[in-house]
Amino acid sequence: MSITYVTSFYDIGRKTEKKDIKFENYFEWINNLLTIPINLCFFTTKELHDQLNYEPRENLIFIFKEELPFFDKLDQIKQLWSKYETNNSQKDTPEFICIINGKFIWLLEAIKRNYFNSSHYGWIDAGILKVALNPENLILITPPDKIKCLLLNYIDSKEIINPCFVLSCKYKIAAGLFIGPKELMKNMSNLLIQHFLFYMDNGYVGLEQEYIAIIYKKYSHMFDPYYGDFSDLFRNFYRCVGSRWLVDKNLENARNNNDKLEISRLENYLKN
């Protein structure tokens, strides 16, 4: 069994001097990611590829795509975007919405092509090393039985029922890294695309984090979560190394809501 990771990098015209989202800064983070010897399918353009600095290897493939997912719906997304409540307007733009939800289109394409004959697939954000600590832990990750994703904050079953749930970043799930068996990843990707289009047809658009949170609560049997903050994407994968206070907060909220499944998951996670 093996894991193939999928990522993408595109210029969507973001103009900012903020260090953590400035377009030019991504090249260093991506170059560092490319030094980690994981199976990686990388969607980008030929122009951006030629600006990267990396050593070619057999388990690294670049797929050049000029047309971006959901950009055919950009006008509709722009019309709906005024409803979204963001605390970072330079990052959260209609173009970003297309890209961030488009990762599931790319995942499905990579799974279909299955370049490295992998049993498992994972999404990894190209700029993940701007936040995630201990990147050396990435190569220690083994294929999980279910979808592993990092929960930042407790998700209440009642809150996801309101369609307005997607209209602001709730910081529920860190969508920069999630890994699972091929069929489950296909199912999740299709479900997310369906939810994204359904909500958009009903007048709502948001980040992929919130759609994943909805799917997580609706289809909990597909997931085996872990817990922490964005910095813990690699280091908390198997046990709580960082952000214990946040994990304890999740457990407290789960107990307050008598959420037996989440209580069990958190207690088992903290035993490791």
Image (cartoon, grey):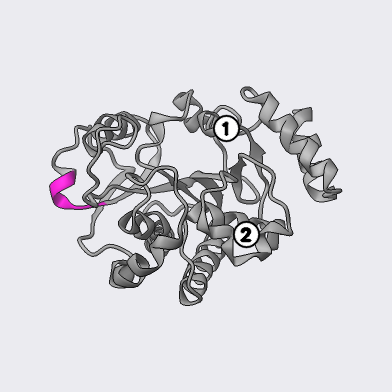
The amino acid type found where label 2 is placed reads: Ile
The residue type indicated by label 1 comes to Asp
Find residue 233 and report its horizontal and vertical position in percent: 53, 34
The boundaries of the magenta stretch are 44-48
Helix, strand or loop for the magenta stretch, by majority:
helix
Residue drawn at 62 percent across, 42 percent down:
151
Give the CA separation, mark 1 to mark 2.
Answer: 19 Å
Q: Is residue 219 visible?
A: no
Task: Tell me the element at label 1.
Answer: loop
The x and y percentages for residue 133 are: 48, 24
User: Residue 214: which disc?
Assistant: 2
Q: Is residue 74 left or right of residue 5?
A: left
Quarter of the figure with residue 98: bottom left
Residue closer to the observer: 37 or 26: 26
Residue 116 vertical placement versus 127 (above, below): below
- Badge 2, how many Cα within 10 Å: few under 14, some, many 20+? many
In the rendered structure, the answer to whether residue 146 lies left or right of residue 256 reads left
Q: Position of residue 263 (x, y in %)?
A: 81, 42
Give the labeled residue for mark 1.
229
